[in-house]
Image (tube, grey):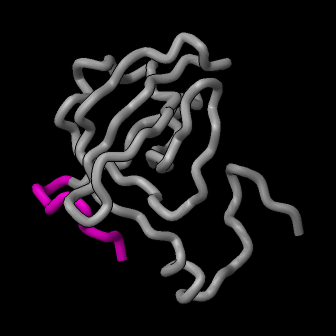
């Protein structure tokens, strides 16, 4: 059985899910990323006192401006290895889902939750 981005993945156990460390962060800096192959922003996300501020690159230019991102709470995977994206070392993966046109919409908490709070 093959899987694609639009079909369910293979089943995993709950312990496997718990290995992915997803935390709440707040975007404190956002700027254009002209060196990226696809339109993107360079982000700095405050993930609370235990994790600190981390860098990320996100292809979210269709629905967001850098100014509209400042102060926004987002979810990010914090335990993937850093990834070099052009001249930027992306330290966390900012999470989103594609809209009908394939443009990324951020996943955000709908209530005020503490920075660094873990998704379970």
Viewer-closest of 104 and 66: 66
Viewer-closest of 96 and 47: 47
Q: Position of residue 59 (x, y in %)?
A: 52, 28
Compared to 77, does 12 lie above or below? Answer: below
Magenta segment: 110-120
Compared to 71, does 73 lie above or below? Answer: below
Whether residue 52 sits left or right of residue 21 in the image: it is: left
Q: Residue at x 28, y 29 (%)?
A: 29
Residue 50 picture quarter: bottom left
Name the quarter where the N terminus is drawn: bottom right
Q: Residue at x 46, y 58 (%)?
A: 77
Whether residue 74 sits left or right of residue 87 in the image: it is: left
Is 115 part of what is drawn in magenta?
Answer: yes
Q: Position of residue 22 (x, y in %)?
A: 41, 64
Whether residue 4 sits left or right of residue 16 in the image: it is: right
Q: Residue at x 55, y 17 (%)?
A: 39
Q: Residue at x 70, y 67 (%)?
A: 9
Is 117 part of what is drawn in magenta?
Answer: yes
Q: Position of residue 7 (x, y in %)?
A: 70, 58
Q: How many marks?
A: 0
Main secondary structure along the magenta-highlighted residues: loop
């Amino acid at each position: 059985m093959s899987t694609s981005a639009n079909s369910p993945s293979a089943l995993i156990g709950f312990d496997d899910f718990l290995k992915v460390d997803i935390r709440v962060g707040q975007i404190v800096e956002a700027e254009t990323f002209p060196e990226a192959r696809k339109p993107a922003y360079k982000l700095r996300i405050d993930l609370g006192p235990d994790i600190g501020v981390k860098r990320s690159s996100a292809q979210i230019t269709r629905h967001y401006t850098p100014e509209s991102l400042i102060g926004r709470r987002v979810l990010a995977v914090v335990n993937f290895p850093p990834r070099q994206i052009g001249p930027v070392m992306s330290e966390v993966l900012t999470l989103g889902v594609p809209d009908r046109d394939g443009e990324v919409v951020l996943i955000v908490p709908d209530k005020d939750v503490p920075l660094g709070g873990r998704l379970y």
